[in-house]
Image: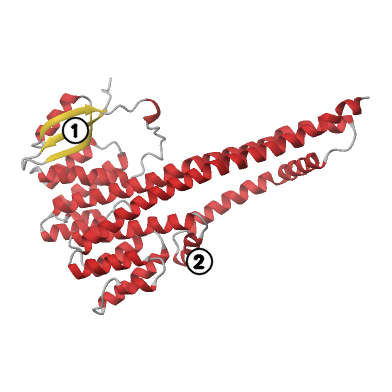
């Protein structure tokens, strides 16, 4: 019988005296302690992570094998910890592959290890898996290899990706409630129109008499939905398929993504998310020693919005001709004056990476505040809309009942 694998949080002291924290999967605390000793780390605390109840992760075959940004962040931090403890890169990759729960990531790590054994560099091994590892990570690792500071680069990658994961989690948390309520409203309306309204319609018609206006509206909507439900489902499937097929095409993005920034209520949130991602990635790459022209090309593509990507190209052209980094940004409204001025000060003082981090932190806080405001605004609106829809349908169905006794007589 196989031993159940548990998750443990640990705190350790490395050979340099620094305290490191992380998460590791193992059958028991003793196994964790043994593994940490093999990594030349002195364990300070080992605590089992409780994953029961609502925190239990649901694993669905075909979906949980996907390698997400969180997996890459954990991998980078653990790899940096092991390298800083004196383990070789090959040994560190072997340990990572053995302890990861994601089969897809495990295969990729083993392939990277085989490439390194065959004589390739770590960045070249990562570059052979461009769909797994972002260009940001590959180029930062390359800069760390050349400069001899791979450990600090991996820590920077881990911190950068962890911040990105937190940002995405904040947005998902804010949008979960409105989306769930909206889906419930749609299902309730469709269910009543398809199954409840026809029952009342047959009853009313058997009694005779003229139906009230609201009831007539519901009956008409029910008849239309019965006819159009299949074409509607097909249209939705075709629409989603076309969207997934074209959403990364440049021509499609040029037409659609500028509309995101102009959307009421949500446009400001999209802008702040893109700015936080742009400044954080650019700061991380510059700090890691990646050339500025190469950094600008990568962070523009990683920003997630074609407007910022186009602005970044203008900045790259300006820097290539010897001009400043911040000046071209002032020509693009997507960059607020505060961002432009702070980047200009960072250039003048030689601390551009630190200034970019401060901008990213500011917009992270702004995103959190904006999502909280949206949630507090959307919740009562969605409740009111859902209540209005259900109330309208209930009133429409029960209005004829008031005249039932007259019709029976």
**Image x and y of residue 324, in percent:** 26, 75
Q: Please state which of residues 6 and 308 is positioned toward the viewer in this rendering.
A: 308
Which residue lies under the disc numbered 2? 255
Quadrant where the N terminus is found in the figure: top left
Vertical relation: 106 (above or below) 329: above
Point out residue 232 in the picture as x, y percentages from the top left corner.
65, 48
Give the residue pinned by disc 1. 10
Question: Which residue occupies 57% across, 49% down?
Answer: 237
Name the residue rendered at 53%, 56% in the picture: 242
Count the marks.
2
In the rendered view, would you say 111 is above or below 195? below
Taking 29 as reference, is 209 above or below it?
below
Q: Is residue 231 left or right of residue 27?
A: right
**Residue 274 location in percent, x, y?**
38, 58
Q: Nearer the viewer, residue 89 or 343?
A: 343
Q: Give the residue at the far top of this rendering.
A: 1
In the rendered structure, the answer to whether residue 377 lies left or right of residue 32 reads right
N-terminal label among 2 and 1: 1
Can see residue 101? yes
Q: Secondary structure at mark 2?
A: helix
Instruction: Say few, some or many: other residues with alpha carbon within 10 Å of mark 2 (under 14 / 14 to 19 / 20 or more).
Output: few
Q: Report the Cα–Cα distance between label 2 and label 1.
A: 48 Å
């Amino acid at each position: 019988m196989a031993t159940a694998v548990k998750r443990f949080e640990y705190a350790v002291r490395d050979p340099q005296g620094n305290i490191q924290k992380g998460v590791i999967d193992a059958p028991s605390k003793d196994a964790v302690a043994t593994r940490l000793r093999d990594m030349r780390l002195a364990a300070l605390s080992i605590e089992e992570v409780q994953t029961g109840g609502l925190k239990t992760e649901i694993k669905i075959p075909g979906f949980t094998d996907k390698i997400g940004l969180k997996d890459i962040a954990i991998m980078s931090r653990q790899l940096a910890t092991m390298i800083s403890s004196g383990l070789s890169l090959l040994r560190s990759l072997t340990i990572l592959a053995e302890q990861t729960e994601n089969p897809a990531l495990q295969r990729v790590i083993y392939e990277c290890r085989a490439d390194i054994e065959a004589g390739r560099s770590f960045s070249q091994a990562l570059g052979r898996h461009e769909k797994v590892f972002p260009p940001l990570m590959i180029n930062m690792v390359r800069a760390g290899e050349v400069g001899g500071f791979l450990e600090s680069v991996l820590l920077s990658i881990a911190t950068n990706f962890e911040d990105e994961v937190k940002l995405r989690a904040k947005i998902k948390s804010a949008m979960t409630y409105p989306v769930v309520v909206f889906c419930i409203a749609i299902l309730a309306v469709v269910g009543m129109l398809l199954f409840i309204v026809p029952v009342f319609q047959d009853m009313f018609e058997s009694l005779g008499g003229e139906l009230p206006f609201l009831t007539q509206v519901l009956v008409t909507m029910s008849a239309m939905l019965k006819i159009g439900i299949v074409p509607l489902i097909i249209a939705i499937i075709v629409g989603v398929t076309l969207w997934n097929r074209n959403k990364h095409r440049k021509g499609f993005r040029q037409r659609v993504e500028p509309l995101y920034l102009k959307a009421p209520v949500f446009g400001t949130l999209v802008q702040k998310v893109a700015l936080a991602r742009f400044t954080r990635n650019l700061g991380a790459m510059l700090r890691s020693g990646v050339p500025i022209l190469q950094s600008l090309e990568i962070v523009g593509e990683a920003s997630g919005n074609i407007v910022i990507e186009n602005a970044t190209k203008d900045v790259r052209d300006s820097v290539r001709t010897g001009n400043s980094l911040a000046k071209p940004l002032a020509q693009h409204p997507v960059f607020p004056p505060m961002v432009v001025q702070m980047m200009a000060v960072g250039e003048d003082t030689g601390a551009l990476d630190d200034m970019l981090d401060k901008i990213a932190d500011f917009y992270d806080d702004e995103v959190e505040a904006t999502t909280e405001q949206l949630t507090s605004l959307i919740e009562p609106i969605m409740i009111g809309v859902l209540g209005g829809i259900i109330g309208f349908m209930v009133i429409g169905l029960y209005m004829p009942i008031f005249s039932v006794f007259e019709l029976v007589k």
